[in-house]
C-alpha cells in the first residue's frame, strides 16, 4: 500500500493534472498523432456519433468531426476545457464538437454513440486511468442503452517485457535510474539479452482485469548482466479488416532498473515476476519486480 506521501506525489501526475504545456508535446508527437488520425479516419464513418473521454486540446475530437455529425468531448481539467473550445473554434469542423466539462468516470452521452475515443494511456497502463474509465463506461452504457457497445479507439493494448543490460554509467557516475526510451530508434548502451515476451493483452471489447500479474522465463541469447527490464506497450488503435492489418501506436518504452542485477551465460534461464494494478504508480510496479537465475529448468 502507498504511503500518504506517495499517493499525493503520484496523484499530482495523474491524467487530469497533465499541464497545458505537456499537451504541446503530445500534439508534436507524430508517432501518436498520425496513428490516431489514421485510426479515426478508418473507424468514424460519415454521420457517425462519437464520444471522446479525456479530450485535452480537442485534437482527436476534431479529427473525428471530419466525418462525424456530432462529437461529445469530455474533459475534466477546466483549463483544457477553455483551451479546447478556443482551438476548436479555429478549425473548420470544430463546430461539430461539443466540449463538456465533466468527469469521464461519470459521464454518459445523451444518446447512443458509434465510436468512443479514449487516450488516457501511459506506458504499461500505469498512472493514467484508461482501463478503469473504459470498464466503468461500458457498465453505465449498457445499463442506459443496452448490450450493443460502440467501437473503441484504441480497441486493445498489448504489453511485453524484455530483459536488458543497460548502461547506467553517466560520465563516470553510476546511477541505475528509471528512464523512458523512444520506440523505433536504436539505443546505444542497451544490450537486448532476450526477445520481449507478451505478458498481457487487454481487449476493450471484453471485460478487462485491473490486476496485472505475470511470471515467466527468458532464455538468454548471449552472456550478460540483466540489470533492467524494458516494458513495451503497443496500442491497437483500429483493426483494418479490408487490409488484414492494424493501426498501432507503440508508446515510448519504460525501463526499470532491477534492485539486484543477475549475471547469466547464454542459454541460461532468467525467471521474472511482477504485479501491479492498472492506473497504479510506477513505484508499485518497480517494488514488485523480481528476477533471478532459474535453476529448476
Ligand atoms: C493523455 S491526455 C490526451 C488528450 C487528448 N485526447 C489528446 O489525445 O491529445 C488525457 C486527457 O484526459 C483528461 N482526463 C484525465 N482524467 C479525466 C477524467 N476523469 N475525466 C475527464 N477527463 C480526464 C486529462 O485532463 C487530459 O486532457
Image (spheres, rainbow, N blue to C red):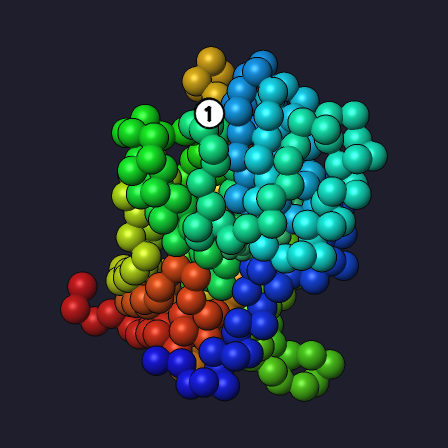
Left or right of 150 on screen, residue 62 = right
From this view, report whether residue 147 is shown above or below residue 159: above
Q: Position of residue 212 (x, y in %)?
A: 31, 59
Residue sitting at the far left: 296
User: Relative to residue 146, is residue 168 drawn left or right?
Assistant: right
Q: Is residue 164 left or right of residue 19?
A: left
Q: Position of residue 196 (x, y in %)?
A: 42, 52
Indicate whether 59 appears above or below 123.
above
Task: Name the foreground residue: 42 vs 71.
Answer: 71
User: What residue lies at 49% left-to-right and 63% top-to-bottom?
Assistant: 127
Q: Which residue is mark 1?
A: 114
Of 179 and 225, nearer the camera is 179
In which quarter of the view is residue 143 placed? top left
- Residue at image coords 43%, 18%: 241
Instruction: Give whichever of 152, 258 is nearer the camera.
Output: 152
Q: Secondary structure at mark 1?
A: loop
Name the residue rendered at 36%, 48% in the picture: 136
- Percent from the top left, x then y, of residue 106? 44, 50
Is residue 17 visible to us here?
yes
Amino acid at each position: 500500500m502507498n504511503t500518504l506521501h506517495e499517493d499525493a506525489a503520484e496523484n499530482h501526475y495523474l491524467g487530469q493534472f497533465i499541464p497545458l504545456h505537456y499537451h504541446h508535446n503530445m500534439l508534436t508527437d507524430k508517432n501518436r498523432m498520425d496513428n490516431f488520425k489514421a485510426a479515426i479516419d478508418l473507424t468514424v464513418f460519415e454521420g457517425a456519433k462519437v464520444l471522446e473521454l479525456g479530450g485535452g486540446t480537442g485534437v482527436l475530437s476534431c479529427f473525428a468531426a471530419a466525418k462525424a455529425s456530432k462529437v461529445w468531448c469530455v474533459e475534466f481539467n477546466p483549463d483544457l476545457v477553455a483551451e479546447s473550445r478556443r482551438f476548436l473554434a479555429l478549425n473548420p469542423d470544430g463546430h461539430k464538437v461539443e466540449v463538456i466539462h465533466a468527469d469521464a468516470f461519470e459521464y454518459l452521452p445523451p444518446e447512443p454513440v458509434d465510436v468512443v475515443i479514449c487516450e488516457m494511456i501511459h506506458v504499461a497502463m500505469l498512472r493514467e486511468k484508461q482501463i478503469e474509465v473504459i470498464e466503468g463506461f461500458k457498465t453505465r452504457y449498457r445499463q442506459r442503452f443496452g448490450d450493443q457497445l460502440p467501437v473503441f479507439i484504441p480497441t486493445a493494448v498489448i504489453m511485453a517485457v524484455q530483459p536488458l543490460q543497460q548502461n547506467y554509467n553517466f560520465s563516470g557516475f553510476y546511477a541505475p535510474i528509471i528512464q523512458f526510451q523512444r520506440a523505433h530508434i536504436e539505443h546505444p548502451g542497451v544490450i537486448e539479452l532476450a526477445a520481449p515476451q507478451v505478458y498481457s493483452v487487454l481487449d476493450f471489447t471484453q471485460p478487462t482485469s485491473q490486476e496485472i500479474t505475470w511470471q515467466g522465463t527468458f532464455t538468454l541469447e548471449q552472456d550478460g548482466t540483466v540489470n533492467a527490464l524494458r516494458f513495451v506497450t503497443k496500442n491497437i488503435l483500429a483493426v483494418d479488416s479490408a487490409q488484414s492489418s492494424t493501426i498501432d501506436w507503440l508508446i515510448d518504452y519504460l525501463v526499470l532498473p532491477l534492485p539486484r542485477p543477475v549475471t547469466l551465460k547464454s542459454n541460461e534461464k532468467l525467471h521474472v515476476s511482477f504485479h501491479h494494478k492498472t492506473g497504479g504508480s510506477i513505484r508499485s510496479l518497480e517494488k514488485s519486480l523480481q528476477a533471478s537465475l532459474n535453476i529448476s529448468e
